[in-house]
Image: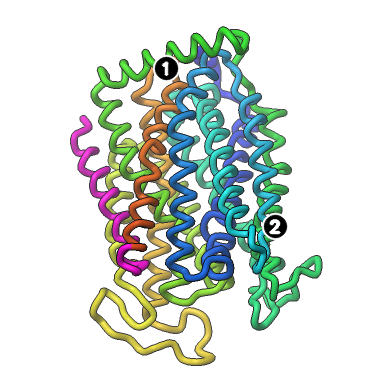
């Protein structure tokens, strides 16, 4: 790929960042804070079973991404174009999100439909993200990539925040009171008893994506076409094999990809199970979990902006170390909490009837730790892609973003699978979640080997 002679226009950069804004409601509403807890509390027989099933679906999607993402990235480098690939993968993403509406309680097919649609949507949006990431070096010079990456993540967090406020304030309601977080009746006559507001998070994510991804196709410049698809496939696969050999010879790049493999596994599992864990351990419903999500997206937006500037000043490796330290300490704190316990051994008063939201010490500590996790997650992911830009050959950037997706997904089934298996073996959500901390530790250790 040829480096652009001059940075792209502000309109092009803003349109590129809108991709993260467009995609984030799926991760915020479906993967973590609204639909996933609904699945565990209303469709699965127990929260522990829901955590296990959700983990298996996450693991399956991760394995498929691991096998295909680097191949697609290599083909995109050979053809030159990125935007056609983003469009192709946007279609199944939108349809799968929409189909989540049809997973009503009591429907015998609801569980398999929910898991299949969640896996397909995850697969499609991750593939689209590979090609969106690969456009960064066409938009700004190398010394601005960290800030651009942080801006994209900040836009994503902001999109997640706005969409979550809309979903909780106007769509999803407490089944007992029938009111949304803002005290309104759900819009469009959505039935709280049938959890229609929770299920609507799927179609809402689809519509949001369609509206806000459009500027990317109109205003972001694409790389020029290099070859037709058929010869590009052959060239792309050959280049992929060469890049795998190059990655092994490039020790810093190889060590970074291994580290990314470990800590991204842990992060995927942490967010995949966060809402489900809160529902089971603290008894939170969609209103409480969604409010918790609002807090996380606020701190995540701040963290992504600050992390991008710290990245440009101190380098992405230092940002990664700081983020992993926060995630490990706070993750340990989260698994030490249940309804009447904090820090594993300190007993607290049980929730009082009519005590209001977040009235107990465990809930308050959970909020604090979650806010810190949100602040660290954005910089972790933004610094990862800016570090890759520094390490990878510029003419193979899509290919190596495919390898980044490979390293972030090739074992991404392991962390969710470890959580699922440990949850089943112990019957404890907290014990299952403890597996995540091991992946953060491995990632941090490998980064110490990166010079």
* Residue 326: percent from left, percent from top: 31, 56
Residue 67 numbered mark, or none? none
Above-or-below relation of 17 to 432: above
Is 44 situated above or below 23?
A: below
**Does dot 2 land on a helix, a strand or a loop?**
helix
* Residue at image mark 1: 240
Q: Residue furthest bottom?
A: 353
Q: Residue furthest front?
A: 108
- Magenta segment includes 235: no
Q: In the image, 303: left or right of 38?
A: left
Nearest the viewer among 5 and 392 is: 392
Q: Position of residue 8 (x, y in %)?
A: 59, 24
Residue 167 visible somewhere in the drawing: no
Q: How many marks?
A: 2
The magenta segment is: 425-451
Q: Report the residue at 65% width, 46% height from top.
A: 96
Mark 1 neighbour density, 10 Å: few (under 14) some (14–19) many (20 or more): many
Give the residue displayed 54% in from the left and 33% down from the top.
127
Residue 170's place in the image compared with 152, above or below, is below
Tell me where residue 280 appears, x and y as whole percent: 44, 72
Q: Are marks 1 and 2 in contact (CB under 8 Å)?
A: no
Q: Mark 2 = which residue? A: 101
Secondary structure beneath dot 1 equals helix
The spot of residue 370 in percent (x, y) is 41, 64
Residue 245 located left or right of residue 409: left
Q: Residue at x 32, y 59 (%)?
A: 422
Which quadrant: the C terminus? Answer: top left
Mark sitting earlier along the chain (1/2): 2
């Amino acid at each position: 790929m040829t480096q652009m002679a001059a940075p792209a226009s502000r309109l092009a950069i803003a349109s590129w960042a809108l991709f993260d804004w467009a995609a984030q409601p799926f991760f915020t509403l479906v993967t973590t804070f609204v639909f996933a807890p609904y699945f565990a509390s209303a469709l699965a027989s127990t929260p522990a079973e829901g955590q296990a099933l959700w983990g298996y679906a996450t693991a399956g999607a991760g394995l498929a991404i691991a096998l295909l993402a680097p191949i697609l990235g290599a083909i995109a480098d050979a053809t030159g174009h990125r935007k056609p690939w983003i469009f192709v993968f946007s279609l199944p993403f939108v349809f799968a999100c929409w189909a989540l509406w049809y997973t009503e309680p009591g429907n015998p097919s609801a569980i398999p439909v929910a898991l299949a649609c969640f896996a397909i949507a995850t697969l499609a949006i991750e593939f689209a993200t590979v090609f969106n990431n690969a456009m960064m070096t066409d938009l700004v010079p190398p010394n601005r990539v960290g800030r651009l990456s942080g801006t994209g993540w900040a836009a994503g967090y902001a999109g997640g925040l706005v969409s979550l406020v809309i979903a909780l304030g106007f769509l999803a309601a407490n089944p007992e009171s029938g009111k949304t977080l803002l005290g309104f009746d759900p819009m469009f006559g959505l039935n709280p008893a049938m959890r229609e507001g929770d299920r609507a998070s799927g179609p809402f994510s689809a519509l949001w994506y369609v509206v806000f991804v459009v500027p990317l196709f109109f205003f972001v410049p694409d790389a020029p076409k290099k070859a037709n698809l058929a010869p590009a496939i052959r060239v792309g696969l050959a280049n992929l094999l060469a890049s795998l050999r190059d990655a092994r010879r490039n020790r810093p790049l190889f060590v970074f990809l291994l580290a990314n493999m470990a800590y991204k596994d842990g992060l995927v599992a942490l967010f995949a199970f966060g809402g489900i864990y809160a529902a089971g351990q603290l008894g939170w419903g969609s209103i409480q979990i969604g409010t918790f999500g609002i807090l996380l997206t606020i701190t995540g937006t701040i963290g992504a902006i600050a992390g991008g500037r710290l990245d440009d000043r101190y380098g992405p490796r230092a940002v990664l170390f700081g983020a992993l330290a926060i995630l490990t300490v706070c993750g340990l704190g989260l698994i030490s909490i249940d309804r009447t316990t904090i820090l594993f051994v300190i007993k607290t008063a049980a929730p009082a009837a009519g005590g209001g939201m977040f009235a107990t010490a465990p809930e308050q500590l959970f909020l604090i730790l979650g806010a810190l996790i949100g602040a660290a997650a954005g910089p972790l992911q933004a610094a990862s892609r800016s570090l890759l830009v520094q390490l990878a050959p510029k003419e193979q950037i899509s290919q190596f973003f495919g390898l980044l997706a490979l390293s972030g997904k090739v074992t991404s089934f392991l962390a969710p699978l470890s959580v699922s298996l440990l949850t089943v073996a112990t019957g404890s959500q907290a014990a299952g979640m403890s597996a995540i901390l091991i992946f953060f530790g491995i990632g941090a250790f490998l980064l110490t080997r990166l010079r």
